[in-house]
């Protein structure tokens, strides 16, 4: 007599049957990742953004520029005052914010919900290029684990569900470009090169710091094709022309507006001073940025008294750029202390506040002890920010040798420290860590497999 299976066993068999197909389904990867992100937005009501400082937390400088565009002032006013035309931020995401403001209102909860939903779509779509990258280097099993880890990890959901910024879009673009770079080695025809040029153009207009990976990706593709005796000259020329045509209109706009060449954005001096000024301690401190902005706004007010001064923004932040360069040149020895802190910042979700008197090494010993002490509860998982420590743990694991089962040339195909190292050490902000940490994920899962 045949044994009748229990309902629990039938449900388990049914789930396993569904999972065997769903685990490699891009639809279910995207649907699961998006459902988690959108559900959190609704449950936590993260679209209710505090209206402090005239809603500055709603997109910060990009939100301000989006408001100016929506109100008909053009790409301008990154701060509270009407400071005029600007290149403080790259253009793509502020124009997206402006489009949403036109449809759903300026600084409304509806606009926040739409923008956070769009960010969640970008973050959920990132599962797909991550899957392709991991499968090419380590096989399907690692690819499945890697993609689903990205879908469910709390850390990678944070910025897409709380920050109205370009972080999720930049992460998606960099991941697609990373996967495409690996495929250029064997690609036939010109279509992959067309995609390469167009996507790098979009990346530049979204976050120019992503361009730090462009030389490595292009040279690697050419080198691998050269070794395989495949042509690449036509593809390189085509992708270069497309890339240049993508960013040229914005460069022309900047030149016509400011009377000099500005490569996409103009706030390098301010960022340089944030990370290397007199207060440089490896981390971002709000009062430092506020001081820079206050100085700039004061310069705006002073220059606004001169009716013949057309380039208020460029002059103000040109002064900050000059100041930052002089300070960085005069404080080269400080990098010996600041740089290790940024390295620690990569492998620790939240560091204690550094001592103000940085050259008192007794205080630095206490500071390092606080780091170790704060790391222990994070490892045990009983502090609120413990989920955020999963990323640095993966990066630490991924930095140890070549994973077992990797293809013979995997170390050439996937160098996790490449974009991550450049993006992570360019300044003291946390947002670039998301795109920079992406290449480490398949590498770490390959070790864990």
Image: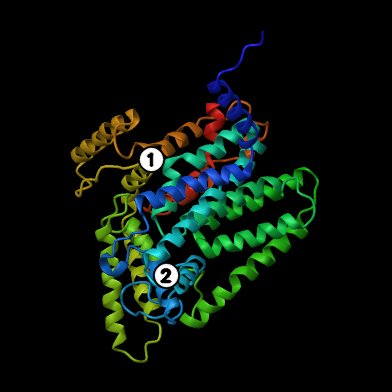
Residue shown at the point (77%, 60%) measured from the top left: 234
> Residue 282: image x %, image y %?
32, 49
Colouring style: rainbow
Q: Is residue 303 left or right of residue 114?
A: left
Q: Pick the quarter of the image with the N terminus.
A: top right
Q: Which residue is mark 2?
A: 88
Q: Is residue 147 left or right of residue 394?
A: right
331 over 139 or under it: above or below: below
**Between 404 and 269, the one nearer to me in the picture:** 404
User: Residue 213, labelled with which disc?
Assistant: none
Q: Is residue 423 left or right of residue 318?
A: right
Residue 363 in sight here:
yes
Residue lying furthest top in this view?
1
> Residue 32: image x %, image y %?
53, 43
Q: Is residue 148 left or right of residue 430?
A: right
Residue shown at the point (67%, 35%) measured from the top left: 409
Sequence-wise, which precedes: disc 2 or disc 1? 2
Residue shown at the point (57%, 50%) measured from the top left: 125
> Residue 295: image x %, image y %?
27, 71
> Residue 285: image x %, image y %?
28, 55
Q: Residues within 10 Å of mark 1 (few under 14, many from 20)?
A: some
The answer to which quarter of the image holds residue 370 is top left
387 over 205 or under it: above or below: above
Q: Pick the quarter of the image with the C terminus.
A: top right
Find the distance from the CA under tag 2 to the CA under tag 1: 30 Å
Q: Which residue is mark 1?
A: 388
């Amino acid at each position: 007599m045949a044994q009748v299976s229990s309902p629990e066993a039938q449900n388990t068999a049914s789930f396993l049957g569904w999972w065997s197909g769903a685990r490699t389904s891009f639809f279910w990867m995207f649907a699961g990742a998006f459902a988690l992100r959108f559900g959190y937005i609704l449950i936590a009501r993260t679209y209710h953004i505090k209206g402090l400082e005239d809603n500055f937390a709603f997109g910060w400088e990009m939100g301000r520029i989006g408001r100016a565009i929506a109100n008909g002032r053009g790409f301008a006013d990154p701060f509270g005052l009407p400071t005029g035309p600007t290149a403080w931020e790259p253009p793509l995401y502020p124009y997206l914010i402006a489009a949403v403001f036109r449809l759903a209102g300026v600084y409304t909860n509806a606009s926040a919900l739409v923008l956070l939903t769009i960010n969640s779509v970008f973050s959920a779509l990132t599962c797909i290029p991550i899957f392709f990258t991991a499968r090419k280097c380590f096989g399907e099993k690692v690819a499945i684990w890697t993609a689903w880890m990205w879908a469910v990890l709390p850390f990678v959901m944070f910025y897409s569900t709380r920050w109205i910024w370009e972080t999720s879009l930049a992460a998606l673009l960099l991941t697609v470009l990373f996967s495409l770079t690996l495929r250029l080695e064997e690609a036939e025809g010109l279509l992959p090169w067309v995609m390469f040029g167009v996507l790098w153009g979009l990346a530049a207009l979204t976050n120019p710091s992503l361009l730090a990976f462009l030389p490595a990706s292009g040279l690697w593709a050419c080198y691998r094709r050269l070794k395989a005796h495949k042509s690449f000259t036509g593809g390189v020329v085509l992708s270069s022309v497309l890339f240049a045509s993508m960013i040229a209109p914005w460069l022309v706009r900047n030149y016509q507006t400011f009377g000099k060449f500005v490569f996409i954005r103009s706030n390098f001096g301010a960022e340089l001073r944030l990370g290397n000024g007199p207060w440089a301690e490896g981390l971002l401190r709000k009062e430092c940025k506020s001081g820079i902005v206050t100085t700039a706004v004061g310069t705006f007010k002073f220059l606004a008294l001169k009716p013949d001064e057309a380039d208020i923004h460029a002059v103000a932040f040109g002064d900050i750029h000059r100041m930052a360069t002089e300070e960085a040149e005069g404080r080269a020895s400080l990098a010996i202390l600041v740089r290790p802190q940024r390295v620690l910042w990569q492998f620790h979700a939240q560091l204690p506040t550094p001592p103000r008197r940085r050259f008192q090494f007794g205080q630095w010993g206490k500071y390092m002890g606080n780091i170790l002490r704060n790391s222990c509860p994070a490892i045990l998982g009983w502090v609120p920010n413990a989920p955020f420590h999963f990323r640095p743990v993966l990066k630490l694991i991924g930095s140890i040798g070549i994973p077992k089962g990797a293809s013979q040339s995997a170390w050439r195909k996937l160098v996790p420290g490449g974009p991550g190292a450049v993006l992570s050490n360019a300044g003291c902000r946390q947002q670039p860590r998301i795109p920079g940490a992406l290449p480490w994920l398949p590498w770490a899962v390959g070790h864990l497999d």
